[in-house]
Image (spheres, grey):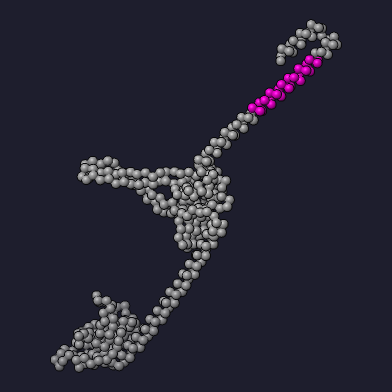
């Protein structure tokens, strides 16, 4: 048979049933891993011509028996090629020449096959046990990695945190440390990966609510359609963090939205039966505004809507309304201070000018008096010059 290994041994025989029965040939070909040939199937006490191909691991029993006056070698085996699963078939090899040699060889090869099969099973069992051991060791390493990271960032300092996504060995969330810095943390113990980004407290400008929940209705009536509706466009903020969305603005790898469903337009349809369907669209979020040293500008990042209460609890002074009022007060105070300084500067300058004028006036009067006392000016010239000086004041 094409593709089969070399034959180890072959056996032949010939039998007939009854004095007038036709002669039937029997053949047995022995290979290292299997046997095949032509004999008879022993079924319901009768012999029916039967060809076979059997692996040693399929053989259940090997024995001798007389059937219809013929000495037969019987091989009982599990047939895996039939429609009926696990069907036990018995093939008979009547009047086989060198039957004892054939039986001995089959026992030896079957025992060898069972030994190899057992060895293979033992190796597979050992490999499975080793794999389970390595898996257990790997899980212990992952658990230790996760515990170390989680304790370092959160548990050891009892830092308040907001969980975006978590399972036994993965965590994505935001926590606030003792300096009130806002930390974005991702732990993936399966891949021994830890990512942490921080917005310093002094760089946080404000946070505020954005978006809203609204509903649209799609109404269909007889021969009439009243518009369609936009649906979809849903975003999982937790998945966004795992993908790296929140880390992008801080110079870390930016990832795609993992559960983003593109917006689609549901076109109106015409129907004889009036029906309507409401669609809930939730596009709420929280916008966090902070100053990026890397980009030298203020940047907005979008966070899940339910993080608002967490931020309000631990960073109440960065709430948009409070920041806005404070900035207004600071602006007014700065304007008033600048205006006061400007007025004071103007008064000082005016005072300096007046002081200079007085000193100059005194000098001119003294000079004029000296000139009059020494006869340089007459009385009329003295009076005239004094009037002129007074008129300049």
Closer to us: 22 or 161: 161
**Residue 293 in sight from this viewpoint:** no
State the residue at coordinates (76%, 20%).
359
Quarter of the N terminus within the rendering = bottom left
- Number of callouts in the render? 0
Q: Is residue 354 magenta?
A: yes
State the residue at coordinates (83%, 10%).
372
73 on left or right of 390: left
Q: Main secondary structure of the magenta part?
A: helix
State the residue at coordinates (50%, 42%).
320
350 on left or right of 362: left
Give the extent of the magenta segment.
343-367
Residue 306 drawn at (x, y percent): 45, 49
Residue 210 drawn at (x, y percent): 44, 43
State the residue at coordinates (43%, 74%).
128
Quarter of the C terminus within the rendering = top right
């Amino acid at each position: 048979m094409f593709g089969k290994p070399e034959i180890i041994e072959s056996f032949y025989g010939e039998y007939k049933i009854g004095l007038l029965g036709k002669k039937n040939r029997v053949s047995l070909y022995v290979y290292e891993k299997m046997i095949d040939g032509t004999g008879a199937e022993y079924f319901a006490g009768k012999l029916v011509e039967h060809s076979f191909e059997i692996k040693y691991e399929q053989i259940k029993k090997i024995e001798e028996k007389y059937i219809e006056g013929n000495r037969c070698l019987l091989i009982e085996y599990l047939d895996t090629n039939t429609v009926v699963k696990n069907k036990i078939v018995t093939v008979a090899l009547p009047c086989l020449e060198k039957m004892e040699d054939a039986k001995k060889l089959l026992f030896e090869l079957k025992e060898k096959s069972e030994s190899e099969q057992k060895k293979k099973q033992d190796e597979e069992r050992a490999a499975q046990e080793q794999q389970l051991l390595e898996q257990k060791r790997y899980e212990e390493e992952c658990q230790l990695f996760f515990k170390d990271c989680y304790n370092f960032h959160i548990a050891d300092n009892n830092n308040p945190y907001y969980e975006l996504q978590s399972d036994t060995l993965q965590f994505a969330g935001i926590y606030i440390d003792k300096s009130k810095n806002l930390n974005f943390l991702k732990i993936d113990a399966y891949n021994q990966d830890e990512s942490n980004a921080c917005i310093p407290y002094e760089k946080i400008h404000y946070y505020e609510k954005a978006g809203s929940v609204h509903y649209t209705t799609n109404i269909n009536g007889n021969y009439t359609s009243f518009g369609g509706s936009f649906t979809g466009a849903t975003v999982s903020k937790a998945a966004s963090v795992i993908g790296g969305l929140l880390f992008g603005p801080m110079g870390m790898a930016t990832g795609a939205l993992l559960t983003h469903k593109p917006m689609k337009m549901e076109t109106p349809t015409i129907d004889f039966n009036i029906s309507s369907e409401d669609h809930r669209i939730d596009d709420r979020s929280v916008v966090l505004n902070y100053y990026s040293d890397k980009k030298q500008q203020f940047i907005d990042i979008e966070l899940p809507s339910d993080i608002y209460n967490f931020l309000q609890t631990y960073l109440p002074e960065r709430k948009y309304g409070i920041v806005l009022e404070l900035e207004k007060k600071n602006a007014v105070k700065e304007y008033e201070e600048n205006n006061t300084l400007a007025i004071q500067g103007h008064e000082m300058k005016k005072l300096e000018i007046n002081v200079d004028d007085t000193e100059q006036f005194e000098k001119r009067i003294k000079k004029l008096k000296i000139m009059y006392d020494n006869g340089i000016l007459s009385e009329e010239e003295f009076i005239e010059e004094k009037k002129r000086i007074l008129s300049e004041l």
